[in-house]
Amino acid sequence: MEFHRQPSMSQTSSAKPCRVDTNPEFFSIPIKKRSHNRPVVEVTFNNQHTFDMIFDTGATTTLITRPMAAKLKLPLVGTQKMLVADGTVVTLLTALAKFQKIDDRIKTDMVVLVAPPTQDIGLLGQDFYEGYNVILKENTIEFHRQPYLP
C-alpha cells in the first residue's frame, strides 16, 4: 500500500517539521530481503528499536505500523488525509518520531503516519531521503546528496 500526501485536504498537526538532520554526502544501506520485489531495510527509531521497513519510492511520507508506534510510545500529534495508491482517501493518525537513523543519515522530530491495523510492515517514504539521488542495486541502496542550487 503506497501513501501520498493529499495537498488539497486539511491537515491537523501541532508538530514541527524536521529541524536537525545529518546530511552526509553519501551513505548506503543493505537490502535485508525483498517483499513482493520491494526492498526491505532496517530503520532505527528513537535510538531504541530497529524495524524492518519497505523502501517505498512511491510513498511521500514514512508510515509505521501500530505495533511499531506502541513499542516506541510515540506521541500522537494529529491526523492527516492521504490519497492511497488505489485512489481512495483515508484519514490516518500522525505521530512524532524524535529520531530516525539509517547508516549516517539521521532525521529528528519527524512526523510519521500510523498505518491502519491491516498494515503489517512500515514504509520508509521520500520524506526520509529527500535531497538525495537514490540508486537501487541488487543488494544495497545508495544515496548521493544532491548539490545545493540557490
Image (cartoon, rainbow, N blue to C red):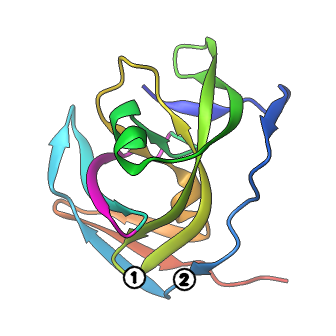
Q: Residue at x 36, y 24 (%)?
A: 119
Question: For residue 113, what is the image quadrant?
Answer: top right
Question: For residue 50, what is the image quadrant?
Answer: bottom left
Q: Along the polypeptide, which appears first: circle 1 or circle 2?
A: 2
Where is residue 57? Give x, y as percent: 46, 47
Q: Residue at x 44, y 65 (%)?
A: 134
Where is residue 125? Give x, y as percent: 50, 48
Local packing at callout 2 (Cα closer than 10 Å; few below 14, some 14-19, many 20+) is few
Q: Is residue 118 left or right of residue 52?
A: right
| C-alpha distance separating marks 1 and 2 | 7 Å
Instruction: Tell me if residue 50 is in the magenta stretch.
Output: yes
Question: From what the image shows, is residue 89 above or below residue 74?
Answer: above
Where is residue 10? Give x, y as percent: 85, 28
Q: Amino acid at mark 2?
A: Thr
Question: Depth check: 24 or 93 in front?
Answer: 93
Pointer 1 residue = 104
Do tag 1 and tag 2 residues touch (Cβ < 8 Å)?
yes
Question: Depth check: 40 or 143 in front?
Answer: 40
Question: For residue 117, what is the image quadrant?
Answer: top left
Q: How many marks?
A: 2
Secondary structure of residue under mark 2: strand
Where is residue 71? Give x, y as percent: 34, 45
Q: Quadrant of the N terminus?
A: top left
Question: From what the image shows, is residue 11 above or below residue 21?
Answer: above
Local packing at callout 1 (Cα closer than 10 Å; few below 14, some 14-19, many 20+) is few
Q: Residue at x 65, y 84 (%)?
A: 147
Q: Which stretch appears magenta?
A: 47-58
Q: Residue at x 31, y 47 (%)?
A: 53
Question: From what the image shows, is residue 46 above or below residue 51?
Answer: below
Pointer 2 residue = 22
Q: Is residue 49 left or right of residue 16?
A: left
Q: Quadrant of the C terminus?
A: bottom right
